[in-house]
Image: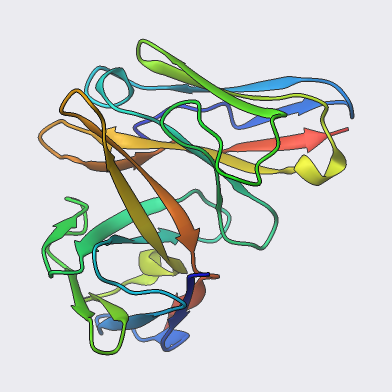
Amino acid sequence: QSVLTQPPSVSAAPGQKVTISCSGSSSNIGNNYVSWYQQLPRTAPKLLIFENSKRPSGIPDRFSGSKSGTSATLGITGLQTGDEADYYCVTWDSSATSGDVFGGGTKLTVL
Amino acid sequence: QVQLQESGPGLVKPSETLSLTCTVSGGSISSYYWNWIRQPPGKGLEWIGYIYYSGSTKYNPSLKSRVTMSVDTSKNQLSLKLSSVTAADTAVYYCARRVIVATGNGGYYYYMDVWGRGTTVSVSS
């Protein structure tokens, strides 16, 4: 059971928009920055978003991130079939058992 | 550009020690933190721990008693050892560069910007 809660799956049609939520607590998302990773089938994860909402060079502006309180959200607009992947949120947990915590991952299906 | 390559035995017997190496090319290990992360078949990602190039470490509390990480700056390599393995340790193991940035207000943020392709380790007799 993951410390950060993500929906197991989301789906939308090509060209549409989708959001993926990541819910945590004050010991993790509430007081730390969130990053997001995309994992295409049979590949390593790839950085999509850092510092809650910033995109690394080469990541299209179709991908966006935000944070409010103890939740973070990844948004993807103009969905493409190539966006089908698993998406993970990550942050630091400052509780007694401190360390990186991952969401359980969300499988995006582009119908 | 920096590239990471994990390597090690693909099969380890139960109760033995899993040993993996991550070779960093195209850049230096120095001045960075380095993560180890694993992914059991069909499951999500799990943080194992990180190591700084100086050798300081931070481990996942759930694995701390069995994990040892080290760094060899002369070879630009990281290593991971996981002892007393069981079938639950079967996974793809990744190394990733951990970038830490200080913010203006005394805090910091971090992210993993470069990942290896991963190496599959199965625990079976």
Which quadrant of the figure has residue A14?
Answer: top right
Q: Residue at x 68, y 53 (%)?
A: A40
Q: Is residue A1 visible?
A: no
Q: Is residue B50 left or right of residue A20?
A: left
Q: Residue at x 85, y 37 (%)?
A: A80
Which quadrant of the figure has residue B80?
Answer: bottom left
Along the viewing direction, whichever of B46 and B7 lies nearer the viewer: B7
Q: Residue at x 17, y 68 (%)?
A: B66
Q: Is residue A45 left or right of residue B107?
A: right
Q: Quadrant of the C terminus of chain B?
A: bottom left
Along the viewing direction, whichever of B105 and A62 lies nearer the viewer: B105
Q: Is residue A6 visible?
A: yes
Which residue ends up furthest to the top in the rendered image? Answer: A69
Total numbered circles: 0
Q: Is residue B24 left or right of residue A85?
A: left
Whole-percent x, y for residue B89 in the image = 37, 67
Along the viewing direction, whichever of B35 and B91 lies nearer the viewer: B35
Q: Is residue B49 left or right of residue B88?
A: left
Whole-percent x, y for residue B123 in the image = 41, 78
Whole-percent x, y for residue B99 in the image = 34, 51
Q: Residue at x 51, y 75 (%)?
A: B120
Q: Vertical placement of A83 versus B115: above or below?
A: above
